[in-house]
Amino acid sequence: MYRLVVSELAHRDLDNIVSYIAVQLANPTAAANFLDEVEKCYGYLKSNPLMYERCQDAYLERVGYHKATIKNYVLVYKVDEAARMVIIHRFFYGAQDYVKLI
């Protein structure tokens, strides 16, 4: 089992996404469903973090970033095998050019 570490930026990203869905889109049910999917993804990452693909960008792939798609969003993370730890770096809207934002 891996330990999950969520960065402050990722927490902020997630809060912003949930707030946007619940308030701006006026859909609290969709926001709750999104959070359920995030929790499910976190569970997968704790047990098998390499199940998701590496980022396609050459640099991000070389430095070990992976990505998991959750609904319309992308969770970007790294795996530290030696420490048995998964570090969640950021959440991005799928249409964003997250490569430039990391």
Image (tube, rainbow, N blue to C red):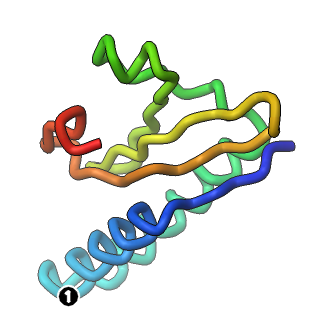
Residue 91 % position (x, y): 35, 54
Residue 97 % position (x, y): 14, 37
**Which image quadrant: the C terminus?**
top left
Position of 89 relative to 76 (above/below): below
**Which image quadrant: the N terminus?**
top right
Amino acid carrying label 1: it is Val
Residue at the (39%, 52%) spot, across then down: 90
Left or right of 4: which side holds 59? left
Residue 60 % position (x, y): 37, 23
Pick the front one: 8 or 69? 8
Q: Mark 1: few, some, or many residues within 10 Å (few <14, many ≥20)? A: few
The quadrant in which residue 44 appears is: top right
Residue 80 % position (x, y): 69, 34
The residue at which mark 1 appears reads as 23
In terms of secondary structure, where does tag 1 sit? helix
The quadrant in which residue 83 appears is: top right
Position of 61 relative to 43 (above/below): above
